[in-house]
Amino acid sequence: MGFLILAIGLVLCVEGLVLALAPARLEEVLRAFAELPQARRRMIGLTALAFGVVLVALARRGLGV
């Protein structure tokens, strides 16, 4: 349970930094993202999911992450 809370906290920190440091740039990125075809957005999401699972697995094993 503590690991899940840590993961959520880290995500919120990163997202908060983006919103605090570059809100205008974030709006541009979101507009560009909205213009992508749905299939491309889905592939980006699945790739991010897979990368996240790999990072979590590495962190759980203690391999330098």
Image: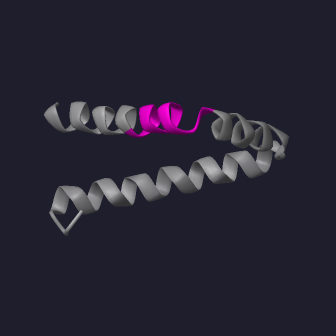
Q: Extreme bottom residue here?
A: 63
Q: Is residue 41 above or below residue 60?
A: above
Given residues 32 and 58, the one toward you in this image is: 32
How far across and how far down the image is residue 42, in percent?
69, 46
The residue drawn where x is 71% and y is 37% is: 30
Residue 18 forms part of the magenta stretch: yes
Given residues 22 and 4, the one toward you in this image is: 22
Given residues 26 and 46, the one toward you in this image is: 26
How far across and how far down the image is residue 58, in percent?
26, 63
How far across and how far down the image is residue 64, in percent?
20, 68
Point out the stretch of residues depicted in magenta: 14-23
Position of residue 5 in the picture relative to residue 25 (left or right): left
Q: Is residue 21 above or below residue 47?
A: above
Task: Please tell me in which quadrant of the rendered image residue 17 appears.
Answer: top left
Task: Please tell me in which quadrant of the rendered image residue 4 appears.
Answer: top left
Quadrant location of the N terminus in the rendered image: top left
Position of residue 21 in the picture relative to residue 7 (left or right): right
State the predominant SS element of the stretch in magenta.
Answer: helix
